[in-house]
Image: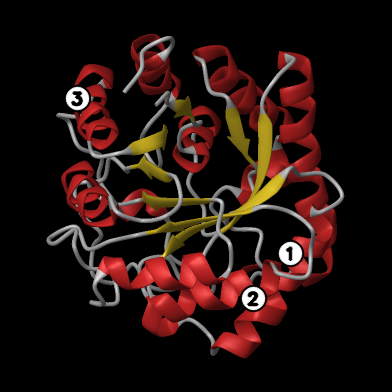
């Protein structure tokens, strides 16, 4: 099996280049400096990424309405997709996936809206992105129901869907909800998920989760974050990622060692999430290019 290299974490890389974290997260870059978004996509492709995820993780109706910008939803979704597609086209190869993050708040699936309500919101995102992307990726889904809402929302569009779940940093065999991570497999199978991944969790937890999912009937992916921990209080639309700290022991070489474990367990789509930048992706690409797992 060969490994396809994904991109890294857009949000933290955008903050690093723009210099400021705001409650709008990566949406702020689309508003203030869209060229930086394009530059980050370009950097990941130059590092060896074969797939780009659009900068739409936080372009959610609920977040925009909270900040008095609800009317800009379609505009910002479209702009983010256009920037990713332009970068891919300039690079000359690769896929663009429309990113969709959790509703309510990341890492807190208990704050998500009911499945039916969530499905309608995800469907609104899918309709806009369908004009641009090659497929969708539901990211950081922390419970079976959170994932179900996203999958129902994407079902009406004729696009492949990738599903990525986030697991407990303390026990990678569990989703953030406390459910067994293996409980996501039947749902993914029912909806014909193209790739099932684990993301935005500590690399050690991702390793546990990939091991648990190794018997799944679809390809597996893995892309960890570089945070020390998800702090209490990181649960509302007014906080910024400044309250989360980056690990000091997760440079490109160290991250690659974790990625090798994921590949050994069967992951064939490998990249990075928050705090994983172009240098990390370059290390993955250099190692996996031409190497068979």
* Left/right of residue 116 with respect to residue 169 in the rendered view: right
Relative to 15, say whether 145 is above or below. Answer: below
Alpha-carbon distance for marks 1 and 2?
12 Å
Which label's residue is closer to the chain start, 3 or 2? 2
Disc on res. 71 = none
Q: Residues within 10 Å of mark 3 (few under 14, many from 20)?
A: some
Kindly tell me whether residue 237 is visible in this rendering. no
Give the SS element for disc 2: helix
Asked if disc 1 and disc 2 are in contact, CB closer than 8 Å, the reply is no
Q: Nearer the viewer, residue 94 or 237?
A: 94
Q: Position of residue 77 (x, y in %)?
A: 76, 53
> Which residue does the numbered mark 2 point to in the structure image?
152
Alpha-carbon distance for marks 1 and 3?
35 Å
Name the residue rendered at 69%, 76% in the picture: 121
Tally of marks: 3
> Which residue does the numbered mark 1 point to in the structure image?
125
Alpha-carbon distance for marks 3 and 2?
36 Å
> Which residue does the numbered mark 3 point to in the structure image?
257
Q: Nearer the viewer, mark 3 or mark 2?
A: 2
Q: Position of residue 192 (x, y in %)?
A: 58, 62
Q: Position of residue 2 (x, y in %)?
A: 42, 23
Which label's residue is closer to the chain start, 1 or 3? 1
Q: Residues within 10 Å of mark 2 (few under 14, many from 20)?
A: some
């Amino acid at each position: 099996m060969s490994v396809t290299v994904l991109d890294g974490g857009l949000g933290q890389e955008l903050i690093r280049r723009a210099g400021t974290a705001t409650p709008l997260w990566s949406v702020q870059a689309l508003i203030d400096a869209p060229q930086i978004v394009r530059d980050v996509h370009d950097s990941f492709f130059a590092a060896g990424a074969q797939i780009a995820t659009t900068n739409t993780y936080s372009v959610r109706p609920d977040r925009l309405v909270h900040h008095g910008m609800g009317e800009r939803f379609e505009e910002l979704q479209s702009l983010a997709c256009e920037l990713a597609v332009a970068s891919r086209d300039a690079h000359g190869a690769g896929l663009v996936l429309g990113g969709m993050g959790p509703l309510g708040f990341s890492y807190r699936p208990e704050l998500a809206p009911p499945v039916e309500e969530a499905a309608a919101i995800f469907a609104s995102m899918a309709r806009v992105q369908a004009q641009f992307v090659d497929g969708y990726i539901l990211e950081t889904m922390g419970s079976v129901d959170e994932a179900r809402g996203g999958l129902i929302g994407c079902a009406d569009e004729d696009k492949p869907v990738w599903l990525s779940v986030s697991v407990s940093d303390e026990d990678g065999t569990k989703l953030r909800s406390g459910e067994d991570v293996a409980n996501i497999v039947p749902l993914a199978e029912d909806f014909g998920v193209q790739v099932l991944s684990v993301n935005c969790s500590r690399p050690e937890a991702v390793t546990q989760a990939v091991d648990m999912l190794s018997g799944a009937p679809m390809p597996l992916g893995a892309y960890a974050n570089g945070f020390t921990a998800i702090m209490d209080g990181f649960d509302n639309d007014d906080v910024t990622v400044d309250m989360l700290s980056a690990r000091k022991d997760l440079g490109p070489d160290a991250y690659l060692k974790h990625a090798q474990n994921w590949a050994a367990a069967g992951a064939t789509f490998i990249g990075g999430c928050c705090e994983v930048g172009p240098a990390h992706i370059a290390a993955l690409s250099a190692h996996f290019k031409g190497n068979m797992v």
